[in-house]
Amino acid sequence: MAGALDPIHQFQIVPLIGEGAFAFTNSAAYMALTVVLITGFLMIGTSARTLVPGRLQSLAEMSYEFVAGTVRQTSGDSGMKFFPLVFSLFMFVLFANLIGLIPYTFTVTSHIIVTFALSMVVMLTVVIYGFAKHGTHFLHLFVPSGVPGYILPLVAAIEVISFLSRPISLSVRLFANMLAGHITLKVFAGFVTMLSASLGGVGLALGVLPLILAIGITALEFLVAFLQAYVFTLLACMYLNDALHPGH
Amino acid sequence: MTETAGPAGTIILAQAEHATPAETHAGTEAHGGGHGGGGAFPPFDSSTFAGQILWLAIFFGLLYLLMSKVAIPRVANIVEGRAERIAGDLAEARRLRAESKAAGEAYEKALADARSKAQAIASETRERVSKEADDNRKRTEAELNARLEAAEALIGATKAQALSNVRVIAVDAASAIVERLAGASAPAAEIERAVDASLAR
């Protein structure tokens, strides 16, 4: 009963196979499911290879063109070398978010370490590629041109802090949205059962209100699931753009 | 699994409220075998971090490989294949349009040629016919003129002959009249002269 109504319970990590720190957990299983679903979706969607796409094929093409459009818009055609990474990020976050919306599932992206690791993939790519491509010129990222000398140290310090806070803001945004959304859903859904359990018929009647709210929040969560995947991708593209064109 | 995790989780959550972070961690370690991070708020339970990062690295790496090596080329193939196909079809349509335009122009030109040729033939025929008619007319005119001239000559000859006949008759008549009136014949030369004089008048 407590487990069923505890809104935190859904984020519990439970080992399924093996023991210890590196056991295969429910989180790992859902990561695997995410990968399988993405790959299955794209492979089945593109299996017909028709000129006029069917539903699944046009969805697969749409996701491809959506991400490709985002990459081209933010970092131009040269950004397309990061397209596989950005596409994988988008699909992973989107599918993880959407899978998490199915009741009784686990949401991979509701754990900050996962979103932080994903954003660190982006930031490390930016730093490594930036230095490999531009050498020390990459540091011009922190020194905007056209700034008077006497406030340059201050501006550079701000730029460095903003750069360092990027992975945190990127990961916390996604994590917090997923976490808060799922807790809210669980709380409102919990109200329905609690009301009907404690107040009987009256509670059942009153329970309609949180039920309607829960339905509304579910719809909102679908929007958030997509929107956060998009925001994550868009910001990743903008940060990767810095690695390509560090001079602002 | 959930049946045991539920109540146990609540108990440990209650413990954690009074525990220092180090104790929470220890508590989590102790229960680690049962359910990963029962103690702390699960997303902040650092004992699960290493495992999550490992599995994320494995599965995200796998996803990246699958996407970059298999899925993206497949979708790109379809999308770009379609773009190429459309571009090719458009080029083909453009070529066919140019071709049909050229054919139309050739037809127009042939039509104009035929028309001008027909006109040429018509005018040539007209000229030939009118020339023939002209020739015919001229020939007929010449013929008629010749006939006219011949007729005129004939008339002239006939007239001259008639006139000479008149003179002979007049001379005969005059000599007969003189003979009857005078009873003597006048010399023929004198009569002829007198007749000529009166004829000339």
Image (cartoon, rainbow, N blue to C red):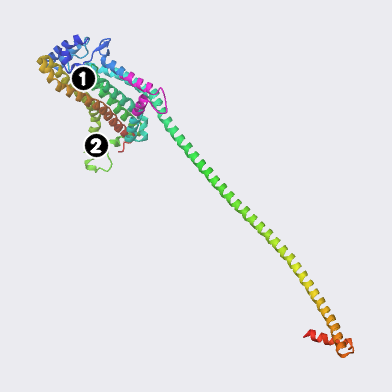
Question: Which residue occupies 28% across, 17% down?
Answer: A30
Residue sitting nearer the eye, A164 or A171: A171
Mark sitting on residue B43 = 1
Question: Which residue occupies 40% across, 29% down?
Answer: B79
Check chain identity for marks 2 and 1: say if they share one: no
Question: Circle 2 sits on which residue?
Answer: A156
Question: Which residue occupies 16% across, 10% down?
Answer: B7
- Quadrant of residue B128 in the image? bottom right
Judge whether residue B104 is colored magenta: no
Q: Is residue B101 visible?
A: yes
Residue B142 falls left or right of residue A35: right
Picture quarter with the C terminus of chain A: top left
Give me the chain letter of mark 1.
B
Per the rendered image, the range of residues in magenta is: A34-63
Disc 2 from disc 1: Cα separation? 34 Å
Indicate the secondary structure of the residue bearing disc 2: helix
Q: Is residue B54 visible?
A: no
